[in-house]
């Protein structure tokens, strides 16, 4: 836990250093559809012993839980009282408000930052489900709020949260020849967006390395598609694939040593595997049709990719040697842009319907096929590292925005930045 | 103008004229007109083209030596609606890289032209409309450009003259999410290098 915290704090600090002028415009999150059957919970205001905490930890946790679609946090205006210690809690008040669980906490200044403690309580039994305290620097208070959100989520739902994560995406300013493309990295709740690369030529397909220290992406800065790998902290970057023809669709192997990529240098558009250290490439697929957008199965032994070998784009699966290729999707005549859930049992994709292009999820262990979004131009699905949500690119009032959809219930959110087109989201690993 | 640069001359070739008129649809003419406007040429400037043979519609471009066109001459060849390379965009159906029959003549003219000017190089840009997967569209754009390249090679151009690049859906000709915009964005463009 501490190492993850420290790592993230380090990342944020490094980004801030590197980024003087490149603080990106604030990303605004809007809940477009709440979830039915969400767990009723109350997160009290974090008492602060008279010193204002520089971050509103209670509010950050409430927003996180609400966005997940799996919790229905009570608005603070409806609180009867606001306890900060368990001996202050009048459980009958919270039962009357209809919540099952209550989070209370407090924060105070310490020598080198802040001391924050919290408790998760069962309102019906009075049982303390969690109780922890932390010493953190001021810069890590938001991160801590995400860690607490993860703890609550996991305790009550039995699977890890994904609040202490990040998003990478492409933001486009301007129109026509004045377009400016930015590769942006932000917290998963949209906070603190930082531009880590700007270009007057298109950028696309950012992909996080499993240790989330590097991003691979496609840049047209050389007036054609080439793949770069950039260290998110230091900004150090290098072109890793600039063969003749297409160089695109990078995806990291689970061990971070290889990239699945798309090349057309040998006369066909095929999937290759590139060794990141040595730069050596090995061809995986071999078909005259388009094979592209490969992503790795969690075992590192399989790739899912888009191919139009059957006449229209569909998703196929192959072992990493390309020996056995089998078709996976059969619903409709256009399925592309696969992403595989971290547990390997769900496949998200762009799915064409009569109402346009939508995000759909196919359950690989059953016949279930679920359309998650409304279209008509939804693209680029990317799973949260806990597999409970998908982020994707969509349109709102003619502008590109990011949408998130829950796989549990029907919660949807939109993340937008005024005056910018957002696209190509990639949810970071934990 | 440098006296040693190859000079353009006009020749009468009635048969070719028929071919060229046959392949120009009203929509194409509009687009060509738009392009000329974008390049800032007025009606007068175009009319003032010095080597036009008055009264004849049928012309073909030829050169005293078989080199690349340069500077103004290339610009003239690109701008003149009667030049065999004045039309430089072919359009495709959704998710298709098959060149429609009605665009085949355009590519044959470019193939002939490139065969006549072996030092002339072009970039074939493949583009798609904005719908569907960006990465798939990148591959689709390349396949469109490759399809164009094959036709040019069949018609006399050489590998050395042709470079293929796909922009996928990243560089639309027309913005907007209408069927009309999509039609104009599903295209391959022949960009003459100078």
Image (tube, rainbow, N blue to C red):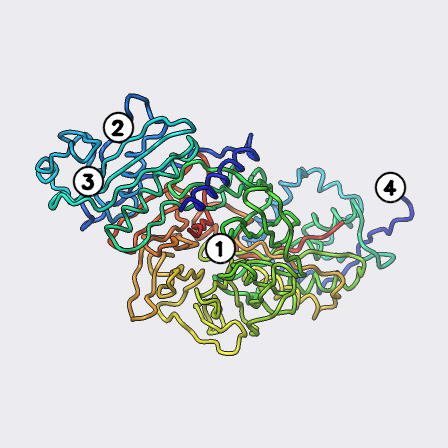
Residue B33 higher or lower than B97, as above or below: above
Side (left or right) of A60 relative to A340: left
| SS type, badge 4 | loop
In this rendering, do the residues under marks 1 and 4 share a single chain?
no
Residue on which disc 3 sits = A102
Q: How many marks?
A: 4
Q: Residue at x 91, y 48 (%)?
A: B4
Residue on which disc 4 sits = B1
- Which quarter of the picture shows residue A280? bottom right
Residues at circles 1 and 4 in contact by the CB criterion of under 8 Å: no
- Viewer-proximal residue, B12 or A65? A65
Front tag of 4 and 3: 3
| SS type, badge 3 | strand
| Horizontal and vertical percent position of residue A376 | 36, 52
| SS type, badge 1 | loop
Q: Residue at x 68, y 39 (%)?
A: B41
| SS type, badge 2 | loop
């Amino acid at each position: 836990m501490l190492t993850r915290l420290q790592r993230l704090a380090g990342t944020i600090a490094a980004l801030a250093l590197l980024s003087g002028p490149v603080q990106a415009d604030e990303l605004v999150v809007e809940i477009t559809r709440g979830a039915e059957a969400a767990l009723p919970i109350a997160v009290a205001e974090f008492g602060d012993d008279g010193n204002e905490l520089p971050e509103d930890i209670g509010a950050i946790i409430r927003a996180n839980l609400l966005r997940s679609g799996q919790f229905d946090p009570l608005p603070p205006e409806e609180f009867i009282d606001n306890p900060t210690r368990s001996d202050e809690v009048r459980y009958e008040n919270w039962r009357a408000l209809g919540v099952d669980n209550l989070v209370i906490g407090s924060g105070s200044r310490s020598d080198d930052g802040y001391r924050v403690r919290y408790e998760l309580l069962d309102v019906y039994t009075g049982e303390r489900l969690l109780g922890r305290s932390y010493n953190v620097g001021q810069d890590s208070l938001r991160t801590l709020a995400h860690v607490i959100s993860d703890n609550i989520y996991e305790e009550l739902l039995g699977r890890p949260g994904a609040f202490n994560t990040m998003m990478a995406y492409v933001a486009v300013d301007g129109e026509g020849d004045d377009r400016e493309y930015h590769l942006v990295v932000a917290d998963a709740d949209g906070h603190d967006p930082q531009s880590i690369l700007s270009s007057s030529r298109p950028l696309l397909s950012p992909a996080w390395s499993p240790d989330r220290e590097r991003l691979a992406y496609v840049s047209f800065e050389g007036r054609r598609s080439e793949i770069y790998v950039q260290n998110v902290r230091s900004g150090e970057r290098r072109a890793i694939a600039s063969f003749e023809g297409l160089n695109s669709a990078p995806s990291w192997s689970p061990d971070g040593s290889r990239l699945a990529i798309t090349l057309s240098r040998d006369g066909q558009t095929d999937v290759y595997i590139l060794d990141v250290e040595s730069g050596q490439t090995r061809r995986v697929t071999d078909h005259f049709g388009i094979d592209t957008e490969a992503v790795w199965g969690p075992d590192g032994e399989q790739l899912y990719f888009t191919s139009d070998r059957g006449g229209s784009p569909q998703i196929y699966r192959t072992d990493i040697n390309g020996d056995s290729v089998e078709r996976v999707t059969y619903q409709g005549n256009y399925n592309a842009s696969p992403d595989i859930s971290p547990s390997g049992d769900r496949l998200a994709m762009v799915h064409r319907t009569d109402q346009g292009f939508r995000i759909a999820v196919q359950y690989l262990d059953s016949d279930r096929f679920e359309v998650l979004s409304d279209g008509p131009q939804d693209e680029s699905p990317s799973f949260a590292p806990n597999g409970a949500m998908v982020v994707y690119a969509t349109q709102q009032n003619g502008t590109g925005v990011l949408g998130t959809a829950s796989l549990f219930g029907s919660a949807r959110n939109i993340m937008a930045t005024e005056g910018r087109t957002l696209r190509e989201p990639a949810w970071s690993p934990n | 103008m440098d006296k040693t640069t190859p000079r353009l001359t006009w020749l009468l070739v009635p048969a070719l004229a028929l071919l060229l008129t046959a392949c120009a649809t009203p929509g194409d003419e509009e687009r060509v007109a738009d392009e000329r406007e974008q390049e800032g040429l007025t009606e007068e400037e175009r009319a003032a083209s010095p080597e036009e043979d008055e009264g004849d519609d049928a012309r073909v471009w030829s050169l005293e030596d078989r080199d690349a066109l340069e500077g103004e001459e290339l610009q003239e060849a690109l701008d003149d609606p009667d030049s065999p390379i004045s039309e430089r965009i072919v359009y495709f159906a959704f998710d298709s890289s098959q060149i429609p029959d009605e665009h085949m003549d355009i590519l044959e003219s470019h193939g002939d032209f490139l065969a006549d000017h072996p030092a002339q190089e072009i970039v074939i840009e493949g583009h798609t409309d904005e719908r569907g997967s960006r990465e798939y569209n990148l591959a689709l754009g390349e396949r469109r450009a490759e399809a164009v390249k094959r036709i040019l090679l069949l018609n006399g151009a050489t590998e050395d003259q042709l470079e293929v690049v796909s922009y996928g859906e990243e560089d639309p000709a027309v913005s907007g999410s209408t069927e009309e915009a999509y039609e104009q964005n599903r295209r391959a463009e022949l960009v003459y290098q100078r």
